[in-house]
Each structure stands twice: as structure tokens, then as C-alpha cells.
Amino acid sequence: MDITSLREWFTIENIMDVIHKYESFGPIPGFFLPLIEAFLPFLPLFVFVMANASAFGLWWGFLLSWGGSVTGAFLVFLFVRNYGQRKVLSFLHKHSQVQRLMDWVDRHGFGPVFLLLCFPFTPSAVVNIVAGLSNISIRQYLLAVMAGKVVMIFSISFIGYDLFALIKQPVRTAILGGVIFILWAAGKQVERYFNKKEGKERERG
């Protein structure tokens, strides 16, 4: 089975069948499917999140998808951060798009990582790899991933739970926009705190 055939198999109906087939494992499949997607980005995270929302309900499905996706992204980041300078990954530094994104992340830290991960169709695997190769701190990256994934995963979960609610209840859609702004503002405040703290630590050193 090639990658194209594999992608075509991953529909909401098939994923829900898998979740129900292994319901004796409880929420474990719902957690691990988004986690695995971080390592195999050709898998459809959108489908996994919508299936979780349909199978487990909006909030429980959201938490499973968010937890699995954040855990997977952080593991990829740590792997690249620890082994990114090795020969096996050295070719990434030579890629012009990766280099531009690295420079952007180095200059702005939390902001670009958060914004990119807010959008469902952003290639999050690229963001995780670039962040791992950049000089962003682990704390800033983890904060950006947790906040960005909240927006992205909840948006998809909301669509999967009630596809027509976005049209029928525009107030909820407006709330999503408000959440993005609040998380952005809060994230920038925390980023300033970390920058000041790290600056004081460097002065002491």
C-alpha cells in the first residue's frame, strides 16, 4: 500500500470504526493517533480530530486530540533539538525555506510558532523541525505549541462535533477569533517574562 492509498483509507468513518473496535482500550487510540501524526505528517490530523470529537464528544475529544498532538510535536522538537546538528539531519540547514523560517523564529520567538500552529493546514511537522533547529527556548516553544494547538484543535473539534454550528451560530465563530487574540496577548506577556528572566540569568552568569 502506497502513501496515497494509505491517506485515502483514513476517513472519519474508518477512524471511528477503529475507535469503536478498540473501545476496550478507552481513550488511548484517540490520544495516540494525533501523536503519531507528528512523526508521520502525511497522516490526516484533521480527520483524527474530527473523529475524536464525533466519538468522544466535543470537550473530551478535544482534550484527547490536543494532548496527543502537543505530546507528539514536543517529542519531534526534542529529537531535532538533540540530534539536529548530526549528519543525518544536516541537510535541513541547507534548505532555503527552512533557513528563512529559522531566522524568523530566532527573531520573533513565540509569535511565529504560535501563529503558524493556529491554522489547521499549516505543515506543523515543518514548524516543529524548524523550531528544533532554531534558538527558541524550550519553554517558549512548549508555550507556543500548547496555545497554538488549543486554537487549531478546538476549531477542528468544533467543526467535527457540529458542522453547521459555524453558520447557524456566528457568535461561536466570533468567539474563536476572540480566543486567538486572547491567547496571542497572553503568550506575548509570558514571552516578555521569559526574556527578562533569561536576560537576568545571563547577567548573573
Image (cartoon, grey):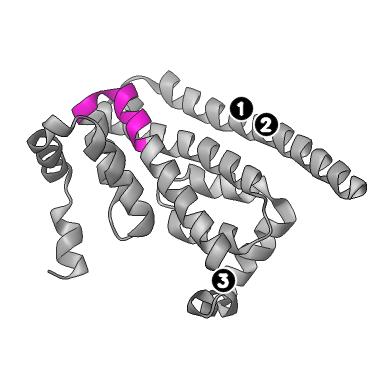
**Residue pictured at 59% horizontal, 73% vertical:** 85
Span shown in magenta: 55-65
**Residue pictured at 26% horizontal, 30% vertical:** 53
User: Where is 129 relative to 205, above or below?
Assistant: below
User: Where is 175 relative to 44, above or below?
Assistant: above
Q: Which quarter of the figure is the N terminus placed in?
A: bottom left
Q: Main secondary structure of the magenta part?
A: helix
Q: Residue 28 location in percent, x, y?
A: 25, 36
Which amino acid type corresponds to the residue marked 2 in the rendered image? Ala
Q: Is residue 126 visible?
A: yes
Magenta stretch holds residue 61: yes
Q: Say left or right for 67 vs 16.
A: right
Which amino acid type corresponds to the residue marked 1 in the rendered image? Ile
Q: Residue 37 location in percent, x, y?
A: 33, 52
Q: Residue 95 location in percent, x, y?
A: 55, 77
Magenta stretch holds residue 100: no
Q: Quadrant of residue 62?
A: top left
**Residue pictured at 18% horizontal, 51% vertical:** 10
User: Where is 182 relative to 126, above or below?
Assistant: above
Query: Label 1 to label 3, Cα distance in Å?
Result: 30 Å
Label 1 neighbourhood size at 10 Å, few (<14), some (14-19), many (20+)? Answer: few
Q: Quadrant of residue 13?
A: top left
- Residue 182: numbered disc: 1
Query: Label 1 to label 2, Cα distance in Å?
Result: 5 Å
- N-term-proximal mark, 1 vs 3: 3
Which amino acid type corresponds to the residue marked 3 in the rendered image? Gln
Residue at image mark 3 = 97
- Residue 143: numbered disc: none
Q: Say left or right for 60 vs 202.
A: left
Query: Label 2 to label 3, Cα distance in Å?
Result: 28 Å
Q: Is residue 163 visible?
A: no
**SS of the residue at dot 3?**
helix
